[in-house]
């Protein structure tokens, strides 16, 4: 974005690298725009949030009673916000590996964060999502949403590759109740992911989702595994 001026709000170094939160003025009158970057790579901002919201709404529509939900990846909180907008949700565990990112939402560095995390249904778990799933009790959730990357082809960290493998998906299956669903977000169609899901779940769906970004329509994919 040539000519756009950013102000750095916060920066941290973790064992996974650098995490930066910065802001810029909007093109039209309105609140400032926040942008999150990891190791210099754009992760998300507060303008184009359609994909984060679409993940939640599409996944929630797949479950009759999504009383207990896991969201893998906090980001700037827009997937969580959409989950909490569903009155059927009684509790939502958000698994985020970066403690500092949780802190930025909790202390108001991300302005909408405090109210979001104050919802009594929210439980923040600072951990790797694979470890959190392994520690969860069997048949304890109705819906698991994974939005830690833009799918297996666009990993934020190389270690995340295991989240698209058989062992992790079997662990997810263990914590799902009958009729429960895992929904994985992907920026591109992935036959390999569909194949791995099919090796674990009897019912697998590949859903294209149309999302408007920067005034144009683009297509994302939702990969779904359903328990009987």
Image (spheres, rainbow, N blue to C red):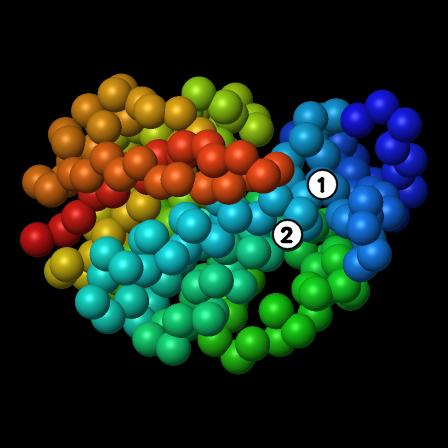
Task: Residue 205: give x, y in percent of width and height.
Answer: 19, 39
Residue 88 in sight from this viewpoint: yes
Task: Residue 91: give x, y in percent of width and height.
Answer: 41, 72
Q: Is residue 164 above or below residue 209?
A: above
Q: CA distance from mark 2 to mark 1?
A: 8 Å
Q: Residue at x 45, y 41 (%)?
A: 211
- Pick whichever, 198 or 78, lies toward us: 78
Horizontally, is 132 left or right of 216 in the view?
left
Residue 176 in sight from this viewpoint: no
| Residue that numbered label 2 is attached to | 76
Q: Quadrant of the N terminus?
A: top right
Q: Is residue 61 above or below residue 87?
A: above
Task: Sort mark 1 into few (<14), some (14-19) or many (20+) by Cα contacts within 10 Å.
Answer: many
Horizontally, is 46 left or right of 163 in the view?
right
Horizontally, is 109 left or right of 221 in the view?
right
Q: Residue at x 89, y 38 (%)?
A: 6
SS at badge 1? strand
SS at badge 2? loop
Task: Residue 112: give x, y in percent of width and height.
Answer: 70, 65
Classify residue 129 by image quadrant.
Answer: top left
- Say which label, 2 or 1, has the lower sequence index: 1
Classify residue 124 by image quadrant.
Answer: bottom right
Q: Which mark is residue 202?
A: none
Q: Is residue 143 above or below residue 171?
A: below
Mark 2 and mark 1 in contact? Answer it, CB < 8 Å.
yes
Q: Residue at x 68, y 50 (%)?
A: 46
| Residue that numbered label 1 is attached to | 36
Task: Residue 173: give x, y in percent of width and height.
Answer: 22, 47
């Amino acid at each position: 974005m040539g000519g756009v001026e950013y102000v750095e709000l916060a920066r941290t170094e973790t064992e996974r690298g650098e995490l930066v939160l910065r802001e810029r003025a909007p093109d039209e009158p309105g609140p400032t725009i926040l942008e999150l970057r990891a190791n210099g790579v754009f992760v998300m901002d507060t303008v184009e949030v359609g994909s984060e919201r679409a993940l939640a709404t599409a996944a929630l529509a797949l479950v009759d009673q999504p009383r207990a939900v896991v969201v893998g990846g906090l980001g700037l909180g827009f997937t969580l916000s959409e989950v909490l907008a569903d009155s059927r949700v009684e509790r939502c565990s958000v698994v985020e590996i970066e403690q500092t990112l949780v802190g930025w939402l909790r202390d108001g560095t991300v302005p909408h964060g405090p109210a979001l995390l104050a919802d009594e249904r929210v439980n923040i778990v600072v951990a790797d999502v694979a470890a959190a799933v392994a520690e969860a009790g069997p048949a304890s959730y109705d819906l698991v949403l994974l939005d830690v990357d833009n799918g297996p082809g666009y990993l934020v960290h190389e270690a995340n590759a295991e989240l698209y493998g058989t062992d992790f998906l079997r662990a997810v299956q263990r914590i799902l109740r009958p009729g429960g669903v895992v929904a994985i977000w992907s920026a591109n169609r992935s036959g390999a992911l569909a194949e791995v899901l099919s090796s674990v779940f009897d019912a697998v769906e590949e859903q294209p989702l149309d999302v408007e970004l920067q005034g144009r329509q683009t297509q994302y994919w939702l990969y779904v595994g359903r328990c009987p």
